[in-house]
Image (cartoon, rainbow, N blue to C red):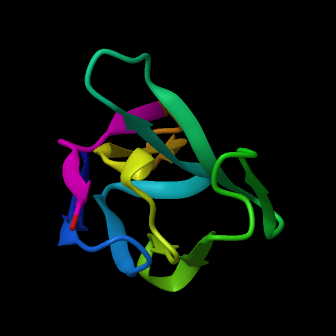
């Protein structure tokens, strides 16, 4: 069984920074990709950052230059460093991981979500 736990988030003033983390544990064989999504009230879930195997990183235009995704493969953990936060970054943030477990079964697992509020 594979589990995913998110941490971080909270309230920050505009221009501030926050860091999120997402740890995957359990019967993991390999993790192919880890992604961060966010969903603001009344809006659709938005893919904002991707860490693929081979150290490839991709970002949505809305966060490019302000957010940084990084990955610790040894710890099966992905981080999202969010700088220069804006009120429009206020949302619930979700982590997603896709890979294979030790039985060579695909897993596609989501975190419970963590709230980020940017407000003065």
Question: Which quadrant, please, contains the C terminus?
Answer: bottom left
Q: How many dots with numbers?
A: 0
In this view of the protein, which residue sits in the foreground, 15 or 64?
15
- Left/right placement of residue 30 relative to residue 22 reads right
* Residue at image point 44% right, 32% down: 108
In this view of the protein, which residue sits in the foreground, 110 or 62?
62
Question: Which quadrant, please, contains the N terminus?
Answer: top left
Q: Where 98 sits versus 11, above or below?
A: above
Q: Where 61 sits versus 53, above or below?
A: above
* Residue at image point 22% right, 56% down: 117
Location of residue 53 by image quarter: bottom right
Q: Where 18 sits versus 97, above or below?
A: below
Q: Position of residue 105 (x, y in %)?
A: 49, 31
In this view of the protein, which residue sits in the foreground, 90 or 96?
90
Q: Is 109 part of what is drawn in magenta?
A: yes
Residue range corresponding to the magenta coloring: 107-119
Q: Where 108 sits versus 111, above or below?
A: above
In this view of the protein, which residue sits in the foreground, 69 or 83?
83
| Dominant secondary-structure state across the stretch colored magenta | strand
Q: Position of residue 99 (x, y in %)?
A: 55, 44
- Left/right placement of residue 35 relative to residue 39 reads right
Q: Is 32 part of what is drawn in magenta?
A: no
- Left/right placement of residue 91 relative to residue 63 reads left
* Residue at image point 66% right, 51% down: 50
> Residue furthest toward the front?
120
* Residue at image point 74% right, 69% down: 65
Q: Position of residue 102 (x, y in %)?
A: 44, 49
Location of residue 111 by image quarter: top left
């Amino acid at each position: 069984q594979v589990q995913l736990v998110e941490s971080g988030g909270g309230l920050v003033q505009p221009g501030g920074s926050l860091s999120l983390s997402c740890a995957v544990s359990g019967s993991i064989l390999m993790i192919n990709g880890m992604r961060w999504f966010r969903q603001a009230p009344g809006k659709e879930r938005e893919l904002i950052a991707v860490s693929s195997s081979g150290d490839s990183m991709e970002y949505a235009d809305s966060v490019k230059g302000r957010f940084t995704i990084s990955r610790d493969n040894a710890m099966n953990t992905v981080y999202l460093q969010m700088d220069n936060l804006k009120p429009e970054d206020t949302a619930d943030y979700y982590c997603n991981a896709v890979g294979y477990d030790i039985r060579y079964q695909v897993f596609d697992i989501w975190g419970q979500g963590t709230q980020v509020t940017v407000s003065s």
